[in-house]
Image (spheres, rainbow, N blue to C red):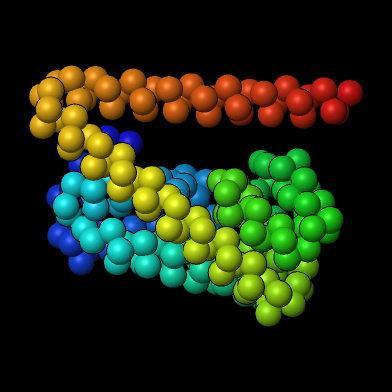
Amino acid sequence: MDSIINWLWGLSGTVLYAVVAALVFAEDALFVGFVVPGETAAVLGGVLAGQGRLSVYWLGLVVTLAAIAGDSAGYFIGRRLGPGVLDVRVLRRRRDRVERAQALIRRWGPQAVFFARFAAFLRALMPTLAGVSRMSYRRFFLFNVLGGVLWGVGYTLLGFFAGAAYEQVQSAVGGVVAAVLAAVVVTALVLWRVRRHRRGSCEHGKSGH
């Protein structure tokens, strides 16, 4: 993660917008989110905006449009290629999760597109599943836009306020203490996500018996 931050920090404003947009777009269109989640790019972009490197308004717009466009691309890829697209290696290794996502879309229809926006694996997969299931694009697009706006603006602002808070702490108590506080926050977030993942795995294991 540090290498990604350092790389982004060395880019110019226009290129930064393009890189963040590309990562957000590719997550939904090309399954890149299994490697670098789009939310990470959105939050890091927001942090840079909070430190004055980018405009938070333009970044929010760029992230939102990239999210909507990425979902639409994923939809048309799934509609064009059909069920065969689910046989790629990255999805074969996650077959049980793919099946649960398919059950979700059968149950909720286009509403699943909205809810999936806020779960990393589903966010990368659901647009393609919607296309494979030949869901009406008009209905898909409505929930795609609703989820994209809420997610894009929300995660951009999350990073923005985190970056602004870091700058305030740094100016008040010095860079070392600010870095320690930032490390504590990041560690807490990582532990929370690990515990949530383990809890989900345990619940899945129990349901399988």
The residue lying at 44 percent from left, 70 percent from top is: 65
Whole-percent x and y of residue 43?
Answer: 37, 47
Whole-percent x and y of residue 89?
Answer: 62, 49
The residue lying at 24 percent from left, 20 percent from top is: 180
Q: Quadrant of the N terminus?
A: top left
- Which residue is situated farthest in the bottom direction here? 138
Q: Can residue 29 be seen in this view?
A: no
- In the figure, 89 relative to 149: above or below? above
Q: In which quarter of the image is the C terminus?
A: top right
From the viewer's perspective, is 209 left or right of 135? right
**Residue 182 occupies which quadrant of the picture?**
top left
- In the figure, 146 relative to 41: above or below? below
The residue lying at 26 percent from left, 41 percent from top is: 163
**Residue 200 occupies which quadrant of the picture?**
top right
Nearer to us in this view, 104 or 19 = 104
Whole-percent x and y of residue 124?
Answer: 57, 54
